[in-house]
Amino acid sequence: RRPDKQRGKTAMLPMPIADHDAITKELAETGRYVKVLWQSDDTLMFIARGRAYRSEFHINPSDEHMTVLKGEMKLHYRKPDGSEDIAVLKEGETIYTAAGIPHSPRFPEDAFLLVGERMRRSGETDSFQWFCPNCDAQIHEEFFVVDDYTKDPVSRAYDNFFDSIPARTCDKCQTVHPGRDFE
């Protein structure tokens, strides 16, 4: 087997090296939330800065692992019975989240995560779900085909939700989700 071939494809050279400290500083200074380190046919790696207002649950069609580079993260997730639980990760800790588990990584804007996932396969979609802060009924869901993570699908999902009072209003109890003021 030729060393420059991998599964019939040319290997990616030079191999990229990511300076976590420089990237977290860049994100903090620019106010951006995501810096994609690389995307290949199989792999997606990025560093994310916290969003204080994050309240949705992401359902990823691939497995995902998250490492806290700086700060602390509270990973809210939904159990099979629909109830919510929280895993608290400290700086330097990593969590593995299997495909299909609704999860919501919540961490402040001065905290940073390294996230690794599989690139989406043809026909796969990601979904983002919001629940009523009063009665816990699902109030909205957004679907996206994530073919290029540099398009920042999380921000697009948020904009669709936050910019719509009907999307933020619970049909069951009429509570209006606070949007970006969520705590």
Image (cartoon, helix red, strand yellow):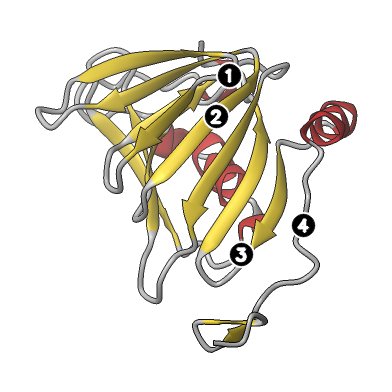
Give the amino acid type for the residue marked by disc 3 in the picture. Answer: Asp
Q: Is residue 174 placed above or below 124 in the rendered structure?
A: above
Q: Is residue 15 placed above or below 121 in the rendered structure?
A: above
Q: CA distance from mark 1 to mark 4?
A: 22 Å
Disc 3 or disc 1, which is closer to the eye? Answer: 1
Disc 4 or disc 2, which is closer to the eye? Answer: 4
Give the amino acid type for the residue marked by disc 4 in the picture. Answer: Pro
Helix, strand or loop status at disc 3: loop
Q: Residue at x 42, y 28 (%)?
A: 95
Disc 3 or disc 2, which is closer to the eye? Answer: 2
Q: CA distance from mark 3 to mark 1?
A: 27 Å
Disc with the residue nearer the chain's start (3 vs 1): 1
Other-residue count near label 1 (Cα within 10 Å), few / some / many at <14 / 14–19 / ≥20: few
Camera sees residue 55: no
From the image, tell me which residue sits under label 2.
67
Disc with the residue nearer the chain's start (4 vs 2): 4
From the image, tell me which residue sits under label 1.
92
Q: Is residue 179 placed above or below 22 in the rendered structure?
A: above
Q: Residue at x 75, y 62 (%)?
A: 15
Contact between marks 1 and 2 (CB within 8 A): the answer is yes
Tell me where residue 147 appears, x and y as whole percent. Answer: 54, 67
Disc with the residue nearer the chain's start (1 vs 2): 2
